Image (spheres, helix red, strand yellow):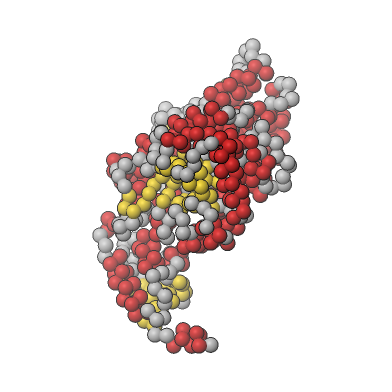
Amino acid sequence: MIAFLDRFFAKHYTSVLHVSSPSGFHLRPAAAFATKAKRFQSTITAEYRGESVDAKKLNALLSLNLEEGDHFDLVCRGKDAKEAHEALTALFESLMHQEPQNTSQETSEPSYHQDYQSQSFCGRRIAPGIAIAPLWHYQEVRSVQQNDTTFQEAIAKSLEYLASTQDEIAQAHHALLATLSEGVADLSQLQNRIATEIAALEGGQMEAKRIDYLDILHLVEKQMGHSTTIPYPSTPFILVADELLPSQVAQLPTSLQGVVLQKSTPTSHSAILLNSAGIPSIICHQPLPQENPDNDALLDATAGCILPTPLPEDIALAKEAQQEARIQEKEAHKQRFAPVVTSQGEPVTILANVTDLSSAKEAKAQGAEGIGLLRTEFLFDQPTPPTFEQQCSIYHEIFSLFEHITIRTLDVGGDKALPYIALPQEQNPFLGIRGIRLLQTHPDLFETQLRAIFEAAQTKEHIKIMFPMIDTPQSFEEAKAFAKEVAQKYQYRIEHIAFGMMVEVPATLFCLNAFNRLVDFYSIGSNDLTQYLYAIERTHPSLTPPAPPEALYQALEQIAQQADKPLSLCGEMASDASEAAWLVAHGITTLSVAPSAIARIKEALRRA
């Protein structure tokens, strides 16, 4: 009762704050405001049009959608209410009067007018950017030329080709084809088997994988004389297609300006490749009008929309944004090796997510300060497990590129199967044996991998080993104890090696105090954490988490507040400029991103 009366009669201070910035009370100033508000014990609220929100929570402030000309009531109530009111009022006025070049952009994405005048069709962004060119709907011409290649020879040649292509998707296709071709006598049987597999995927959480089956079939058919010709225009065009095979993405012509997919998902392999290639792309399920080669369409992939018949003023706005984006991209590239300090004086470390030696070299060239996530699955995605010598060789090469390396132990299971790992049939493999749980079923794989990492790390001073899918303090203790046993067995010195964990299983959020006593570092896997928080598989073709994902934001805030060991985030959200700014504002100042995003994210955070 006394505590209640203290709160009721506590002094409160109220003022009306006017939003004068042309960009409104957007992400960057709101983040600074909320961060400052957290320093006070008082209750601090922002009240607008009958809605009262906690001003210490960034997402709550952003939910008010305060634009230029709006005003809201700042209410501070508590023992230090006067100090809070004075500090926050002064900060707000300062934020509103900062130079336009600092406030008009909260990311390095182009700042342009998105309220186009002509009809637009909205979709989901794959890769940002703007394209202006006529629409061209996908078409193909199929033919068959008889050759002497037998079906078994076609399978062997296809497997040989996939094995020689050093990227994750090709290696995954290799394993899939090896499985699909078992017991199959001819092409028609393979076609029927693949048709059956695709039918089983329809409407399910793995529907996005159907395109991989089609790509594999296309490769085998090609070996047997089947050919597909796509008569792409030689002049600039925007491609409209239901889907693209991953192999077709690599063969897109230079005349292509952008892509609109109508039956894909952002996590399909084709979408991932389009994003990596930097091709402006969206997914739009609405039917689009047929092309007119004499009229330009406008694809604004950053805003996630396509305008089939834009007005001249829409084209003018888009061209202005294109030019601004080119200038910013050029500047970001020039500054890619420079350290990052935000406009608030906060230093930020930008590391890279690396999948193989090639991407590690790209990360080095793009200005990464180290590797925040070295995925090792590429070594295991082949017909037989990699040997100790093979692993040592590749780890040595990658380790030589950077001083600071975080390597994740084998993370398979769920949607990532290996042909030589036999797992029991699971109703939901994403909730089954995956990640560190394989230690219980296949300890030999982990022993060889840890031994190879220890061998390669003997000449390095800053190596971190990270365990995936940790769910309890006991599971981490068991994994680390196993690592120590391997080191002792092969007589490796590991005092210089740090051991940490992925934070991706929601249960760990309730055990952070216990984990603080065990781990050397944390890395948040926002992809899987989002998946498990919302019980939506991340490649599901129709279900997506809400936007904004409030539960995820609250979880990240909790982790940042309770973790007392070095903390980073290596999920896809770190490669989004606005999300990266939010993360930094909430104390997560080490981010690991895709190599292609390094320069862009660095430049965006310098402006944050």
As drawn, is 434 to the left or to the right of 111?
Answer: right
Q: Quadrant of residue 226?
A: top right
As drawn, is 422 to the left or to the right of 131?
Answer: right
At x 31%, y 59%, the residue is: 344
Counting labels gives 0
Q: Position of residue 457 (x, y in %)?
A: 46, 37
Q: Position of residue 393 (x, y in %)?
A: 49, 28
* Frontmost residue, 49 versus 563: 563
Quarter of the picture holding the C terminus: bottom left
At x 53%, y 50%, the residue is: 501
Task: Please tell me whether residue 582 is drawn above or below residue 335 in the rendered image.
Answer: below
At x 64%, y 39%, the residue is: 443
* Frontmost residue, 352 versus 480: 480
Q: Position of residue 54 (x, y in %)?
A: 45, 72
As drawn, is 380 to the left or to the right of 456?
Answer: right
* Frontmost residue, 328 versus 586: 586
Q: Is residue 262 visible?
A: no
Q: Position of residue 381 (x, y in %)?
A: 59, 32
Task: Please tell me whether residue 315 is drawn above or below residue 164 in the rendered image.
Answer: below
* Frontmost residue, 557 versus 95: 557
In the rendered image, the residue lying farthest to the top is 148
Q: Is residue 602 visible?
A: yes
At x 65%, y 17%, the residue is: 153
Task: Please tell me whether residue 451 is drawn above or below residue 479 in the rendered image.
Answer: above
